[in-house]
Amino acid sequence: MGKESSKKVSLYASLQKGILGLILVVTFSFLISTYFIADKEQKNYCKRESESVLKTLSSNIYSDIHKYIELSRIIMTEENLVEFLRADADSVDIGMINDARYGVMNVLNVTESVDGVMIFREDMIMVATNRFTYEYDYELMGSDEWKKDIYDGKGSAIVTLNSNKVASKVDNRPLVTVARAIYDIDSQERTGVMLLNISNILFDKMLSQLGYRNICIMGEDGTYLAGNRSYTQFLDKDIAPGRITYKDVSFEGDKMLLSSTRVSDYPIIVMRLAPYSTEGTPYSFIYVLLALLMIFIVMVFFVSGFIRKNITDPVLLLSESMDKNKRTGELKKVDAQMPSDELEMLKEDYNSLIDHVNELIDTLIDKEKTLQRAEMRVLQEQIKPHFLYNSIETIGFMALDAGAENVHEALETLGSFYRNFLSKGDREIPLSREIWIVKDYLALQKLRYGDIMDDEYDIAEDTLQIVVPKLILQPLVENSIYHGIRQKGEKGIIRISSRLENGDLFLTVRDTGVGMSSEEIKEILSTDNKADRSEADSFGLWGTIQRIRLFEGEEDIVKIESEVGEYTQIEFRIKAK
């Protein structure tokens, strides 16, 4: 009874462990899913917020710079400036330069944040509104390198940084520059270049008005313009215009979202660094998932109780009845009452199996008795081969004493043949032993018929230990001699070969005898067990084919090729073992 109780405890414990494991897996999956969903939603919320901020800020920067581009267009039409640009070099004096400067400054009075305007004639005579606050690179000014991108604009405004490198503020304050080539309105000839520098104070005011604190505005060359200077370390120069890129970065020990965008096609990049927060967490969705989890757990406990009552306990009852039969040592039917039709069917199937097993045991007992009787007959028959070996050996010694060495050699070969042929009574032997049998047999046939045939061997090394049915080559060789080479009346060749291919052993016997007709091949390959087949047929070619078919369990294992008057080739396919 203790054993039965241990079974119950073990099965029930397994059921409890399975239920607990299922609950743990589902709970763990719920927690992981909740984490990833919340994390994804927080990131998406942070991205959406950053996208809104960057788009708004980029739009404002674009609009303000566009106003200064329009202002540069107005400056080009100022009368004193136009006169300065059209005048011959000889007629330009300090008065004309001052008139042009005052004219430009009158235009600038209507706006703010313009740090200065520089206008260069084609002969490099310059007008500047605040000349003494800049340092000029006169060597660069003397070349066309700094003007190339401006000239390429064909009069369109080009937004660049820090006076296109030709001048810089004495206090190193960064600048955004609107540059453009100036063309005469009448002649359409280029008369000069204008650089309008916008102070970075414009961007500081913009950030202050919008209330943005976690923003950094930079030039694409790394020039800091406004905002949080510590963000400059995250500058990514390869940002396409109008596209926002996102990247997780670590800042002051916290994981944060870095969002970056380029303002139109200007060399200005805006970056925002924002921490991930609980804002955007889909609590309502998580509450729904939690409710579904609780419902699932309750259902699992309900199903486990149902399984125990209707399946586990009845199966234990059936198992106890089977175990009782096993302890008695007899295979008897189970007589326990089952609570359901399905388990009753299981019991009936078990009882039917018991009946079938008992029948098989009776059959095996009968076969064992038959096998024992057959083994006794084999032991008796083995006496005859031993007598034959001893007789051949005695005659061989007598022949050797009489000086008949050829006779002694023939008897030795015959003895070797019969030892391989009959010894141990094996039904299956390695291919190497089968080859020995054939060689001994052909040696005896050469002694009998003389020099009417040659034998050749092409045996692959990796096939020698493959197990084959005993005596499958000797009948084929015998058939080649008696029905092939002898009937042809001239010296022939018997060639035996083997090869291993795709896990199959292929054995081939080829002779240069009289050959076979297609009708003869068809009859030999027939599987019909005709009554008029002689005993020799059962051991000869047809019988050998049938034995190999039985050995392999299939029929398509032999192929015969022949040409009348030329040759016959027989090939067997045997699974390598």
Image (cartoon, rainbow, N blue to C red):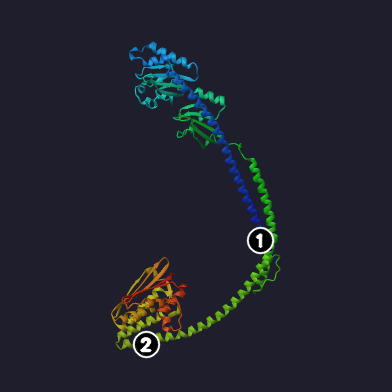
Residues at discs 1 and 2 in contact (Cβ within 8 Å): no
In the rendered image, residue 351, in percent from the top left (x then y), is placed at 65, 72
Q: Work out which quarter of the rendered image holds the C terminus and state it.
A: bottom left
In the rendered image, residue 379, in percent from the top left (x then y), is placed at 48, 84
Label 1 or label 2, whichever comes before in sequence order: 1
Residue 11's tag is 1
Nearest the camera: 374 or 481? Answer: 481
At horizontal 62% and vertical 50% (from top left) the residue drawn is: 26
Q: Indicate the amino acid at tag 1.
A: Leu
Task: From this view, report whether residue 126 is shown above or below residue 221.
Answer: above
What secondary structure is marked by label 2?
Answer: helix
Taking the view exactly as shown, the residue that stands out farthest to the front is: 186
Q: For label 2, count other residues whose C-alpha is less than 10 Å away and answer few (under 14), some (14-19) or many (20+).
A: few
Nearest the camera: 10 or 141? Answer: 141
Q: Which residue is mark 2?
A: 394
Q: For label 1, count other residues whose C-alpha is less than 10 Å away and answer few (under 14), some (14-19) or many (20+).
A: some
Is any atom of residue 275 visible in this view? no
In the rendered image, residue 235, in percent from the top left (x then y), is placed at 47, 32
Task: From this view, report whether residue 467 is shown above or below residue 302.
Answer: below
Q: Quadrant of residue 74?
A: top left
Task: From this view, report whether residue 209 is shown above or below residue 106.
Answer: below
What secondary structure is marked by label 1?
Answer: helix
Is any atom of residue 73 visible in this view? yes
Q: Indicate the amino acid at tag 2.
A: Thr
Real-space CA distance between mark 1 and mark 2, rounded to the nearest whole angstrom: 75 Å
Instruction: Give the number of callouts.
Output: 2
